[in-house]
Amino acid sequence: MTGKPAERAERVDDPYVRLIPVKPRPEWGPAQIVSGFLAASASFDDNHHVAKTYLSPQTSWNPGLRPFVTVLSSRIIAPQVVKTAGDQATVRVTGDELGTITSDGQYTASPKGLDTTFQLAKTPQGVWRITGMPGDDKGGLLLSKDDVERAMRTVNLFFFAPDQQTLVPNGIFLPVVNRQTLPTQLVQALLAGPTSWLNGAVRTAFPPRTRLRRGVHIEKDVATVDLSEEAHAGNIERMSAQLSWTMRQLSEIKRWRLQINGETVIAQDMEATQPVHAWEGNSPDGQVPQGETHENAYVVGASGYLGTLQGDRAQPIVTGPGGRLSRPAIAPDYQEFAGLSATARQVYVAAPVTGAPTPHVLLTAQEGARFTAPSWSNDGTLWVVETRRDESWLWVRPRGRSAVRAAHWGLGGREVLAFRVARDGVRAAVIARIDGRPQVQVGRIAHAPDGSLDVGSFLPVSSELQDAVDLAWRDYNTLAVLGRAKRDSQTLPFLMPISGSAITSLGVGSLGEPRTIAAAPGAPILIGTRSSGKEQVCRQRVPSNSYSPWICPTAAKDPSYPR
């Protein structure tokens, strides 16, 4: 969906623009009635009271506060009457659909044409009213992307990964009736649990049936969250972490107080009011190991050996066969690394990440297949996809064990060009070939009780890229993607919010033929490119922003970050 970059949760705090809907006029014909209804339905005030005045008394339509929304590229302003018969009329509306938002707030990109009809009839008073709505979902809304930007906010709800330590963001679109009720809506959405997409892959610390006893009360910059009796059975610290990370998206809250049945409860090592930016140890982006001495960025240098990026120079740290792997990936704890053979038909693993370790073959591809670049999760698990035209298999190797195929892999019938596990270990971003074009999607990793993995439920992230070449997780909200937008003739780097909001181009200047991209929280984005027959690693000139030029001072390839 297009709109403002949602690399920022600050969108939650955008000024609320209240749409004043217009009631139908007696002289309006069928097309004007439909147009007026579509405009009025973008207002959530008083449970869509004005929009309902466009309907006949017999027409049932109640979208509520969490409706199913079809998102269009622009508002339909010219409905067409395609049939009239006495006091009956059929009005056709057409447009470009970008995606849908389900009732739990989950956005899914689904670019396609929209062609649907409304049925209308004259009332005994002689005015036209809507008697039949499009499709079977009588509670759905047709909103333009601008309507969604105005009436809804992109927010993250935070739940725990299976390790019960790392938080996982669950991005949703939340309708905003007014700015004052947003804190209450946000906490209620958190208590309702994850969306159907993440359900089963994450955990919540809130016991079943836990609810808010009253709206979130804010006095000065201190919020009070009063939970029902059921919360006594929950872990105070984990509930606090979920609430803190969720409420920190609201700028007016600096500290907050947790109450159960009206009595304040205090988390360990906290005061009665705790800072909203506490619980950093539960960050979805993980924690940098204490006492870490390694350089954070790695490349394959001009000598062909794996090295660290020191300034603009590649310093070899691994020599011998292990240093000559392509697409190297360093484990988050720096205990081992993986890479591919030159043909990408074999996966190698080696340790330690210095000296001259001897790599061993972990996997060899079937005839006609190859592997994607390896990816690590924070627990030391190695992930790699074996793929060929129209099929793929996900291989998983936990630390100290053999590699096995994932029991359930949602892209088995697709060619996969890239696979990257998020730092939370629950989400995975891929580039899969869909209808002949590489498309960026995000799926979830669920752990079954028997230990098997279900990696699936992949959803398109954006409809704005025509082609995608490589990707990396910049942080828990944003992907860094090499691709080509519809308006471009060449491959460029973009920031892609996984919320479905607009992609933004990154930097300016020539990059030759970009092939690989590396990103990490707070670190410069690095691009491996080929220009004039030479391999180069490019970075932006400091300070880096959307307009900073790219410079390519390092003779190297395949940049990567351990995290």
Image (spheres, rainbow, N blue to C red):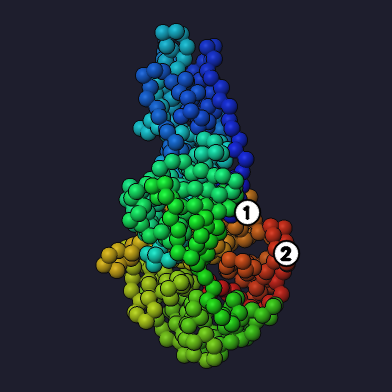
Residue 412 in view: no
Q: Position of residue 519 (x, y in %)?
A: 58, 67
The label on residue 543 is: 2
Front position in the image: 128 or 63: 63
Q: Nearer the viewer, residue 332 or 534?
A: 332
- At horizontal 52% and vertical 18% (from top left) the residue drawn is 24
Residue, far left? 450
The reply, left or right, for residue 544 in relation to residue 57 is right
Residue type at mark 1 is Thr
Report x, y in % for residue 207: 34, 53
Q: Which residue is mark 1?
A: 504
Q: Amino acid at mark 2?
A: Pro
Q: Residues within 10 Å of mark 1 (few under 14, many from 20)?
A: some
Q: Residue at x 54, y 28 (%)?
A: 39
Does 446 sit above or below residue 212?
A: below
| N-term mark: 2 or 1 | 1
Q: Nearer the viewer, residue 396 or 562?
A: 562
Q: Position of residue 445 (x, y in %)?
A: 38, 62
Q: Secondary structure at mark 1?
A: strand
